Amino acid sequence: MFADSGKKWGYVIAWEFRPKAGAERPFEEAYGSNGIWAQLFQHSNGFVATELSRDSTDMKRYLTLDFWESKAAYEKFRAERAADYAAIDAQCGSLTEFERELGRFERVDR
């Protein structure tokens, strides 16, 4: 999806996750580039892509990167879709034993 989107990103949010034992497949489906989160994000014109990666040395550790055209586009999405975001967050909470936001980054080399 990311390579084919044609949109240039300017803002990315990085998250680290550890799915619960036995929930790896549903976690990957929910958090992947075509998962429930990406489907929600696609309601925003400023969304570019979501990427899910698994640590090659710690197979229980995952990283998501949510790419947006700008910080303003992300903040507008969050304001407009806050209830939907909270509902999906509650739904997906049963899939993870750990999650944390690693940071929000603005692109330097445009």
Image (cartoon, rainbow, N blue to C red):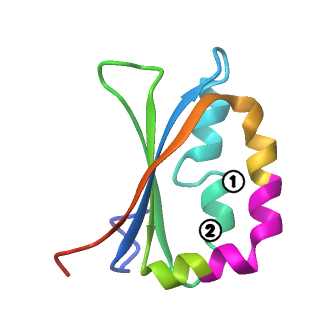
- The first of marks 1 and 2 along the sequence is 1
Instruction: Return the residue nearer the eye: 2 or 60.
Output: 60
Residue 64, above or below 107: above
Looking at the image, is 45 positioned above or below residue 85? below
User: What residue does disc 2 label?
Assistant: 41
Where in the figure is residue 66, as x and y percent of width and height? 47, 60
- 37 in the magenta segment: no
* Quarter of the image where one finds residue 39: bottom right
Q: Main secondary structure of the magenta part?
A: helix
Which of the 4 image quarters holds residue 98? top right
* Residue labelled with disc 1: 36
Label 2: few (<14), some (14–19) or many (≥20) C-alpha neighbours in 10 Å: many
Q: Look at the image and tell me in which quarter the C terminus lies.
A: bottom left
Q: Spatial distance from mark 1 to mark 2, Cα to Cα?
A: 9 Å
Q: Is residue 103 left or right of residue 95?
A: left
Q: Which residues are magenta?
A: 76-87
Q: Nearer the viewer, residue 42 or 62?
A: 62
Residue at the (51%, 84%) spot, across then down = 72
- In percent of width and height, residue 85 lies at 74, 61
Of 1 and 21, the residue lying toward us? 21
Please name the residue shown 64% across and 56% down the image: 37
The vertical placement of 95 against 76, above or below, is above
Q: Secondary structure at mark 2?
A: helix
Residue shown at 38%/80% (left/top)? Answer: 7
**What is the secondary structure assignment of the residue under circle 1?**
helix
Kind of residue indicated by mark 1: Ile
